[in-house]
Image: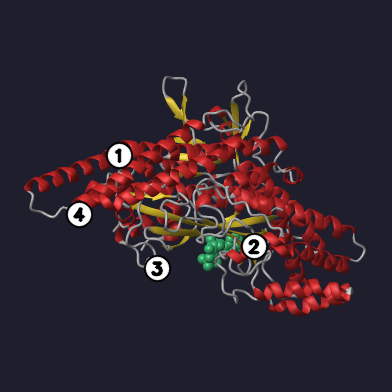
Amino acid sequence: MKDVPALFGSLVFNDEVMQKKLPRDVYLSLKRTMMQGASLPPDISDTVASAMKDWATEHGATHYTHWFQPMTGITAEKHDAFLSPDGKGGVIMDFSGKALIRGESDASSFPSGGLRATFEARGYTVWDTTSYAFIKDGTLCIPTAFCSYSGEALDKKTPLLRSMEALNTQALRILRLFGNSTARRVTPTAGPEQEYFLIDKSVFLRRPDLVYTGRTLFGARPSKGQEMDDHYFGSLKPRVSAFMHELEEELWKLGVPAKTKHNEVAPGQHELAPIFSTANIAADHNQLTMEMMKSIAGRHGLVCLLHEKPFEGVNGSGKHNNWSLATDEGQNLLEPGDKPAENTQFLLFLVAVITAVDEYQDLLRMTVASAGNDHRLGASEAPPAIVSMFLGDELTRILEAIEAGSNYHGDAKRYMEIGIGMLPSVPRDTTDRNRTSPVAFTGNKFEFRMPGAASSISGPNIVLNAAVADVLRGFADTLEMAEDFESALSTLISASLRAHKRIIFNGNNYSEAWVKEAERRGLSNFRSTPDALPCYIDEKNIAMFMRCGVFTEQEVRSRYEIHLENYCKTLHIEAMTMAEIARGLIIPAVIAYQGELSALLCHKEALGRFDTTLESRLLERVSTLSARLLEALTRLEEEIEETRVPREELALCRFYRDRVFPAMQALRATADELEPLLGRRHWPMPGYGEILYSVN
Ligand code: ADP
Ligand code: MG
């Protein structure tokens, strides 16, 4: 048995270590800084840095890095040794407060969407004091935000922290109105459930599509897919189990509270969920988790695929973002309370989330838009591209009664009594969990189920936080001015419900009927990434971001550009890889096979006394398909050529979607027909069966 408590956080410069290593006044000052989410005061920075360095070197670290999340999707680090000349020809281990607080980084190799002028390539990184430093691979990692020299955010952490600040400010105003004078901070909490595939490394290396793009661009369906449902929660294979044990242990050391692990629906698919934490820490931890998954898989001869749709016809991988609001006193603001007053407060926060999700449904959808996730959303394995909320039947009925109550009686006081009288029965987990809903209320939190497995959770959390903050600001403005708080509150709740109840849907989100019903309700349905992205720069959305201090208009526009570019690049690489595989691997294999077949056919015919039905039929079929393959390949290559024509970036995205992608699909369809004809011996790559069942 491992001593988990001793292991947990053993590579983290956490509270316990700080208390041990820092003078008491410095420790208290640092704690205050962390509580407020402020930056490190210069007068204690040298002491903190030096303690960090001592602790890190005791644990074998020789380097430090500012660890940050640029817009590339990965986590970036630039390692510096602690070394400093001692003036006598030797070196000492040194780490200054200045180096801890702020790092310089050449921003030019990270996407900035036009924010960074070429003459100003520098960017800088600043420690997010609320996220602990940790040691990874002998390097002290300092979680940092990354900005351009003129202060624009170039990363995913900066706007997340800003959105948390906005939410804190507005949520506290609401709490004060309910008489809470003691809470000092409200933070969004997040618990991301991470899905992934594990496949054998030697098999992976023989699939150029997986190597270059993370997903299979070809592949006929295997005779056994996920239809038996025998993988879900099934027992773990020994290699997978060994991987999971090591992963868990490494994550615990890094202070990531990995808690549950199990098999998922598809063969080779698994899930890991942590215990939730503050949103920015959860985001850091999720990045670390993805990174560790990849590196630890390698040690077991495995490859971890985080792509949203590695295999056609097999469920892809998502990342459920569980989200709630917590006070520093430990209260979950989305937990229905036992007392009527608590319940009204709960109701107000609930209604704020409903309002926010309805008003910014387009933005929420946009945060999960990517070339990879386009394969999942709306394909009956993940929620559709239409954002709606599941509240469960009972809670929905309560809300309907509240809305109707004030409607019909017009007597706010009385409705409040009705509402309160009914509330203690707000149920937890009585309704069957609706697994098809994009945004499901699951008792005391919302589960946002649209994100893809590969992307950072920062985007969705930024929008959730900012949108809810913005709605709460409106609520607080109204309520603070009200002469009669109770009646203003009831009017506000019922009016908001009336305006936004269209977003509530408890039925089956996978059904065709819902698509029609949603359209009737006026809900947006952005089926693909090029459809979803433009709402980023809608006036209403930019205005909201600006009101919350989350993004400047320029920052929004730069991000929009980066997302567009990302989509085009992804499809471009996929298209090029397909063409390369078709030309370089499939066509030669098809030719060789036809050579064998026709030689055999000639021989048999020369002998004159054997039946040649099989050979001639096969040859005919393969000949026909290979001609079609060449045609499809030629078309794809022409479409790729067409992408060079100068176009506006959004038009280019649409071109990839409407012209390049269908050409890819057509090429794939023909190749997938050829694959079973050639069989394992002649097909130039391992097939789905071999990949999906490669791990034992
Ligand atoms: P499931 O039944 O979907 O497995 P769980 O209740 O076990 O759901 O939780 C799933 C995820 O939700 C976990 O990562 C958990 O830590 C997270 N979670 C639970 N409560 C909260 C909360 N208040 N805020 C954010 N995430 C939460
Ligand atoms: Mg879940």
Q: Quadrant of residue 420?
A: bottom right
As rendered, which of 418 and 113 lies closer to the eye? 113
Quarter in which the C terminus is drawn: bottom left
Which amino acid is tagged 4?
Answer: Leu
Q: Which element is circle 4 on?
A: helix
Find disc 4 in the rendering and name its residue.
614
Q: CA distance from mark 2 to mark 3?
A: 30 Å
Sequence-wise, the earlier of marks 3 and 4 is 3
CA separation, marks 4 and 1?
A: 22 Å
Q: Where's residue 352, x and y in %? A: 74, 60
Who comes first in sequence, dot 4 or dot 1?
1
Q: Could you tell me residue 151's position as x and y percent?
A: 67, 32
Spatial CA span between label 3 and label 4: 36 Å
Q: How crowded is the residue under tag 2: few (<14 C-alpha within 10 Å), some, or many (20+)?
A: few
The disc, 3 or 1, on the residue closer to the chain's N-terminal end is: 3
Q: Are marks 3 and 1 in contact (CB under 8 Å)?
A: no
Which percent across, then down, holds residue 329? 68, 61
Is the residue indicated by label 3 positioned so its CB lies within 8 Å of ligand 2? no
Q: Earlier in the sequence, mark 1 or mark 2?
A: 2
How far apart in space, not on screen, are marks 1 and 2 (Cα)? 44 Å
**Viewer can see residue 525:** yes
Q: Could you tell me if the residues under marks 2 and 3 are in contact, i.e. CB atoms within 8 Å?
A: no
* Callout 2: CB less than 8 Å from ligand 2: no
Q: Quadrant of residue 525?
A: bottom right
Question: Dot 3 lies on which element?
Answer: loop
Q: CA distance from mark 3 to mark 1?
A: 36 Å
Question: Residue flagged by tag 3: what amino acid is it?
Answer: Asp
* Disc 1, SS: helix
